[in-house]
Amino acid sequence: MSVSVQVSPLDKIFPSGIFPSACPSRVLLDHITSKWGVLVLVSLTGRTLRWGELRRRVEGISEKMLAQTLKTFERDGLVSRVALPVIPPHVEYSLTPQGDELVTLLHPLLGWVAVNAEAILGPEAGSD
Amino acid sequence: MSVSVQVSPLDKIFPSGIFPSACPSRVLLDHITSKWGVLVLVSLTGRTLRWGELRRRVEGISEKMLAQTLKTFERDGLVSRVALPVIPPHVEYSLTPQGDELVTLLHPLLGWVAVNAEAILGPEAGSD
DNA sequence: CTGAATCCCCAACGATACTG
DNA sequence: CAGTATCGTTGGGGATTCAG
């Protein structure tokens, strides 16, 4: 499977060269590239997950960071949260159409990382 | 202009669901999504830059973080460093073929962020 | 000019405990 | 089950200084 993505010429958008500091793009990029951002977003690709499922999938994330990451993405309109008013609570997270667009672009990146990680860092990697 | 990228089905690579913690992929992903990683990589798209130029382009980065980021990418084989033995020193940074592959995947992402940032965070954004 | 080394501090992060 | 609250730690990251 392959997708055709529009490559926006960055120089057209930012003739000055790079994202100026303190512009909305920087903020959004920071959210996405936050420590757990990519992992959380990709985990929601094509499926709806409950809090607990998400926590288990994103191996190593703490409750605090999961809550914080999800809240940020919810504010950004990338993740939608649906709480069913039942006991015990039942909350479902999924991608919004915008979030779905984003993960579509994230996937090739993750795929490349997965393929190249061992070759780059060596089979024995684990440290920084 | 558009490119066709191979979308590796992530589930094929990681049937368990998500990147296991402490695997090479996580490490490499952390490098790329480090605070200044994406910005530095993208700045080097299609061109060779000197230390000072890089510093000016990646608005807001400190010398320490620029050095640290470049060194990490050099070790990862994503950035190549050429020091001309002259006085005053003259050092050039550019992407390796691997780094070039990576930024090719980064570009659509950055483009999307640039386009959607204002819509998502509102024209008045700037805070977290 | 390029960068290494040092100091220092804030906030990001994790662990734990508690609540609706 | 799905969070919030609180606290403690740590290391990421900025400012500054020094060296080649």
Image (cartoon, coloured by chain):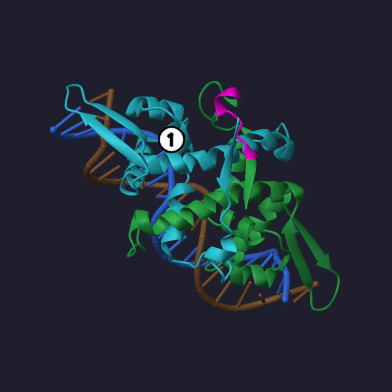
Chain colours: A green, B cyan, C brown, D blue
In the image, A46: left or right of A117?
right
Residue A8 spot, x, y in % from top left: 61, 31
Q: Is residue A85 left or right of residue A55?
A: right
- Name the residue located 45 percent from the left edge and 32 percent from the top edge: B45
Residue B128 can be seen, yes or no: no
* Quarter where residue B22 is shown: bottom left
| In-front residue for pair A88/B81 | B81
Lateral position of residue B65 relative to residue C14, left or right = left
Specify the subunit that label 1 lies on.
B
Q: Amino acid at mark 1?
A: Ile
Position of residue D4 relative to residue A87, above or below, is above
Q: Is residue A10 visible?
A: yes
The number of discs equals: 1
Q: Quadrant of the C terminus of chain B?
A: top right
Q: Position of residue A117 (x, y in %)?
A: 41, 56
Residue at image coords 43%, 38%: B100
Residue ID at (55%, 28%): A20
Range covered by the magenta-colored residues: A5-12
The magenta stretch spans residue A62: no
The residue depicted at 69 percent of the width and 55 percent of the height is A71
Q: How busy is the neighbourhood of tag 1: few (under 14 within 10 Å), some, or many (20 plus)?
A: some
In-image side of A83 versus C14 (left or right): right
Camera-nearest residue between B50 and B127: B50
Q: Secondary structure at mark 1?
A: loop
Would you identify the image quadrant in which residue B92 lies? top left
Return the residue at label 1: B61
